[in-house]
Image (cartoon, grey):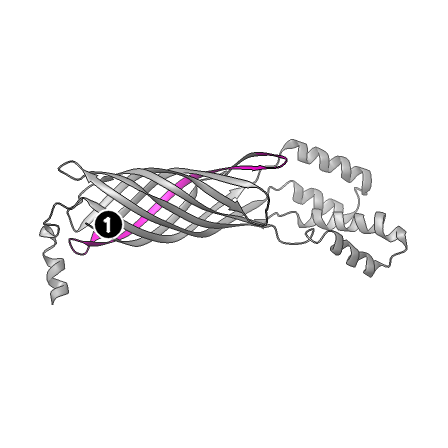
Amino acid sequence: MIFVAVFVSFEGLIAEDVRNSITLLGGGAKYRVTEHRDPEYYASYKYLADQWTDPADPVRMMSDVSLAQPPVWEGSGSVGRLQYERLFFDSKSLGLTVGAGFGKIKEKCIKNCGDWTDLLIYKTFNELILTPANLSSSSSGFYMLFLLPSLLSVRESGYSYTTLDVGLNYHASADSFLDPYAGLFGGYGTCSLENVTGMTCNIGRYGARLGMAINLTNRFFLLAQAEIERVEMNVTGEDGGGKLVLPVPDKHLMAGLGFRF
């Protein structure tokens, strides 16, 4: 009965002039991107393929066909946000946010991943390099996989990050039971690339968010939030560095709990 009474009387839900809140959100991230290779890649492939393989070889023909179809990558993972917000104006419509962002993303090739090209490399290496060294076919395959174990493996990569975030939110009705909001944010921090050592990685994130706060009491509320963001990473090492930009915006769906004070 107490629970029902709280929700029926939500019009007077927040009697105090509470303007500060802390929220903790967690959820998932997902994106899909088609990789468009540089023309130089095709030119290098054709030159080497013509040098070492027969154009009439069925494996070569299938490799040529698959190369004309761009690979498709899919990224997914988990994200989290710890956020402080301060509301301004009598209407409490503008919120300034600061906090921390966390994420761990796994990327995997799911279509047109170059398996036929890998097989062509394996076949050519086996026939032209290992077999003439008086190795049997089976032992050639063993040495091939020992020397180049990644040739026939699934292509995967990933990264994780921790950032300091700032942003602005517009609240439609901060003191009501349902409070829809929209905002912009940006973040900067450190990142790490999976299976890569000896390099320094910094990450920048910026994007937009759309959410709904459900005020359970004058202190506690639930959150559901969607984000879309652009990710840029600067990677440096002993041999130099460069920028990695996610080709498409990353999309997040999150839920969490908040406390006002």
Q: Is residue 250 left or right of residue 256?
A: right
* Residue 230 is inside the magenta segment: yes
| Residue at (67, 50) in percent of width and height | 115
| Residue at (75, 47) in percent of width and height | 121
Q: Is residue 227 visible?
A: yes
Q: For this rendering, which residue is in front, 13 or 260?
A: 260
Q: Is residue 132 left or right of residue 62?
A: right
Q: Is residue 59 visible?
A: no
Q: For this rendering, which residue is in front, 14 or 65?
A: 14
User: Looking at the picture, how far across and down is residue 140, in whole percent?
Assistant: 82, 56
The crowding category of the residue bearing disc 1, from other C-alpha atoms within 10 Å (few below 14, some 14 to 19, many at least 20), is many
Total numbered labels: 1
User: Looking at the picture, how far across and down is residue 79, in whole percent?
Assistant: 41, 50
User: Looking at the picture, how far across and down is residue 33, in whole percent?
Assistant: 51, 43
Q: Is residue 44 above or below residue 107?
A: above
Q: Is residue 67 left or right of residue 135?
A: left
Residue identified by numbered label 1: 213
Element class at badge 1: strand
Q: Kindly give the residue lying farthest to the bottom in the view shown.
A: 1
Q: Is residue 77 above or below residue 247?
A: below
Give the magenta-colored segment's residue range: 213-241
Q: Magenta segment, principal secondary structure?
A: strand
The quarter of the picture where residue 19 lies is top left
User: Looking at the picture, how far across and down is residue 60, in whole percent?
Assistant: 75, 45
Q: Is residue 110 left or right of residue 81?
A: right
Type of amino acid at the residue the image marks with label 1: Ala
The quarter of the picture where residue 138 lies is bottom right
